[in-house]
Image: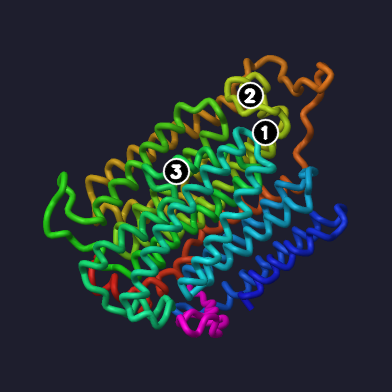
Amino acid sequence: MLAWTIYISFLGALALLFVPKAVVRPLALLTAIAGFTLALIAFLQHRTGELITITRHPWIPTLGIEYHLAADGISLCLILLTGLVAITGILFSWNIQQRANQFFAFYLLLIGSVYGVFLSYDLFLLFVFYEIVIIPKYFLIATWGSTRRAYGAMKLALYSFIGSAMVLIGLIAAYVMAGAKSMSLDALAGYHFSPHFQMAAFPLVFIGFAILAGLWPFHTWAPTGHVAAPTAASMLLAGVVMKLGAYGCLRVAMTLFPLGLSPWGFHVLGLGSWREVFAILAVIGIVYGALVALVQKDFKFVIGYSSVSHMGFILLGLMTLNQIGLSGAIIQMVSHGILAGLLFGVVGRMVYDRTHTRDLTALGPMNLNKAIPFAAVTFVLAGMASMGLPGFSGFVAEMMILIGAWHAFPLLATCVGLGILIGVIYIWRAMQKAFFAGDGLQPIHHVAGDHGTDEPLPPITFPERLGAIILIAASITIGLYPQMLLKIITPALNSPLFQGLQQGVWK
């Protein structure tokens, strides 16, 4: 059944190229809803600790490559997130007029490819879907983007290809070292690679995936890509595409090469393992992203660098190598996907498409809290959730990561506290400047029209309201009942697939 999340998305993308323009949006939305429904059914029916084999057929038998789709609790959480963001991204893009058929076709092609990555159990198949993702995200930004869209699209594609090349080299090396018989994840994870090989292969594959996850200092494509992308593409890029990188770090690099996280036996600049190196880079990303967001004048750049900071939490959680930290990292993947999508929806669709500016100084005098109050309320809620306010998903995720980091890296956990504090400040600053910086006099409800006359700001549409409500409700649901995710994440982390981590460097 879960395989149809991929097939429906691809078939929907193909159909959208030929249907009349009048039915493009409803068809795209129905396709996304169908994919989400299948993901939700599988999520609700999942038995804890069970690996679901969806389909398994020989693909390239002479190389031992199979068309093998499977899912565990980790995959199901991220598939559910993908379906949710897919629906809301379409709702926030209901106004697309320029080449709408092609826009939503590329959109669904991207969604189907993301589903494919999360469901692939054969690593060659995973890599194929991972590469397909690059194509639609490039064209979505280059064709329908805004600020320096060609530059942003090309930079994102180049970084993605560089990371993919690193991953491919590592996977081919592992395949050959294991006897060139299978590319199945469980077969390679069960092979005992030599410690020296794992020490060399782990950083290669981890960095290859972490580039897409926004690891500092390989993060520079992310803010540029976010700002250049149209709203729906920004939501997908921050909401699910960056999660592909984090998922690959956990599912592939850490699973295949667990001894790569072990101590080197010597120290360089006070660092004695790749685990310590990547933990420090993750913390630098948290603090650096927050500091840069704090001084941005472009509203969308604030959210772009905020994503870099919050992705740092995920990578730090992975490096804790304890159950609470790893579980927190997976919940943070889901939480950040929801909240980043919501923030980009507010900034890109509700604000920029109406005011035609993202300059915080220019937005202030417009008294947007009175001109478009729904947008102001939505940003306040999303901002509070992003800060880690109790009752929202961000609080649960960051708290678990902090506890895990305190056990593993007490000093780094203290530095993370600084990043959280700066995060509160930059969200509050953006909120005040964009929505509450008016002089308290008669509110300005107008922007300059095409003929120099003032026109009222268009009201927030029903699709936008519905998309925002869905994402807010999802964050609150996870914040109030995180056990909904933890009950399938924890058994997945204790499964035989992670046996190498459990027996080696698991803390």
Earlier residue among tags 1 and 2: 1
Task: Measure the alpha-carbon separation of dots 2 and 3.
Answer: 24 Å
Task: List x then y, in percent, for residue 298.
Answer: 56, 28
Whether residue 37 appears in this view of the structure is yes
Taking depth in this image into account, of 382 and 321 the one nearest to the observer is 321
Instruction: Specify the quadrant of the image occupied by residue 184.
Output: bottom left
Span shown in magenta? 51-72
The tag on residue 351 is 1
Report the amino acid beneath label 3. Val
In what quadrant of the picture does the N terminus appear? bottom right
Q: Which residue is mark 2?
A: 363
In this picture, residue 458 sits left or right of residue 280: right
Secondary structure under the numbered disc 3 in the rendered image: helix
Residue 87 colored magenta?
Answer: no
Task: List x then y, in percent, for residue 53.
Answer: 52, 82
In what quadrant of the picture does the C terminus appear? bottom left
Magenta residues, dominant SS class: strand
Q: Label 2 near label 1: C-beta < 8 Å?
A: yes
Taking depth in this image into account, of 86 and 100 the one nearest to the observer is 100
Task: Measure the alpha-carbon separation of dots 1 and 2.
Answer: 9 Å
At x 67%, y 37%, the residue is: 375
Residue 68 colored magenta?
Answer: yes
Q: Which residue is mark 3?
A: 308
Task: Measure the alpha-carbon separation of dots 1 and 3.
Answer: 22 Å
At x 16%, y 44%, the residue is: 269
Q: Is residue 374 above or below residue 53?
A: above
